[in-house]
Image (cartoon, rainbow, N blue to C red):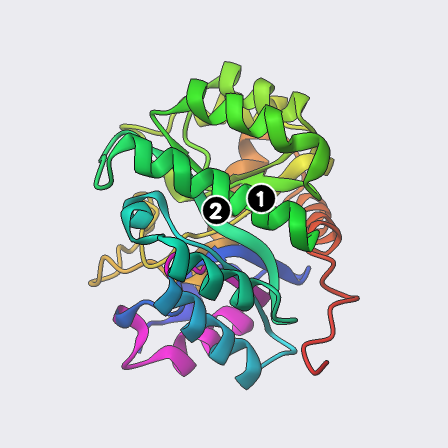
Amino acid sequence: MLDTATIEPSRTPLVDIGINLAHDSYDHDRAEVVARAVQVGVTRMLITGSSLQSTQRAIELVCEAPERFRCTAGVHPHHASELDDEQSVALAALARRPEVVAVGECGLDYFRNYSPREAQLTAFRRQLELAVDIGKPVFFHQRDAHEDFLSLVREYRPRIAGGVVHCFTAGLDEARAYLELDLYIGITGWICDERRGEHLKEVVRHIPRERLLIETDGPYLLPRDLHPKPKSRRNEPMYLPHVLRAIAAARGEDPEELGAATTRNALELFSWESADVRA
């Protein structure tokens, strides 16, 4: 079992707004993963739905611990080719569930192009329409597709109930474009990567406190600067306070005050307090 003693706990309850807890890498110790997160102050987690299967599993996890979890319902651009008419109907039914507080993870990914771009655009538009229809915010994904992504989001932004550009790794121009649309920006442990994430230390200084969210995106994006380094490369929510402190250091702010702000932001965006999963 991993030792939480190497992670300085947060005195402020934190929300991990992006954790792929339905991923099979957590199947053997999911309860322990959650317990470690709670031990260091990560008291609530938003479980990412990135396909019909993972969304259904995420809903099941929320039902097991509604005081701890909420989830999203969506189809990641990697799976966009799968979102036909039948799957769209099934996704809409899942997205209406009270356990679900956002549509997504959805968007565009031209870095991998696991689905053709036209399929990605079609799937993204379908999920934006769904968000408009059910009045829930959007959990956005964008990689190497800024112009097409921004065009679609601008089209739908007046009709959607907000959203977060999750796992933001781009530059200041992209961040400003999303902030102009009154979106939240989610920052991960990418900021802890001295090879690829150093620019984020400048970017985060320009994100208003009221538009900042924090996430691990586990099991991906394990912070590179953890000491001692865990034997496993798997990321998990217990590392969220570490990510928060990296962001706070870059901004020159107190991590407890910043953490409290990100928690308020998460609860507001996802209507966490008002969502009754027992409905």
Distance CA(mark 2)–CA(mark 1): 33 Å
Residue 108 x %, y %:
38, 34
**Magenta stretch: includes residue 124:** no
The residue at the point 61 percent across, 71 percent down is 99
- SS under mark 1: helix
Q: Quadrant of residue 12?
A: bottom right
Q: Quadrant of the N terminus?
A: bottom left
**Range covered by the magenta-colored residues:** 25-51
Residue 222 x %, y %:
32, 51
**Magenta stretch: includes residue 38:** yes
Whether residue 221 is visible, yes or no, is no
- Kind of residue at badge 1: Glu
From the viewer's perspective, is residue 249 above or below residue 47? above
The residue at the point 29 percent across, 29 percent down is 110
Q: Nearer the viewer, mark 2 or mark 1?
A: 1
- SS under mark 2: helix
Whether residue 25 is visible, yes or no, is yes
Are the residues flagged by discs 2 and 1 in contact, CB closer than 8 Å?
A: no
From the viewer's perspective, is residue 3 above or below residue 210? below
Disc nearer the start of the sequence (2/1): 1
The residue that disc 2 covers is 243
- Kind of residue at badge 2: Val
Hey, which residue is sitting farthest top in the picture? 173
Horizontal arrangement in the rendering, residue 115 relative to residue 5 (left or right): left
Q: Which mark is residue 74?
A: none
Q: Residues within 10 Å of mark 1 (few under 14, many from 20)?
A: some
Q: Quadrant of the C terminus?
A: bottom right
The residue that disc 1 covers is 129
Residue 4 x %, y %:
42, 69
From the viewer's perspective, is residue 102 above or below residue 139? below
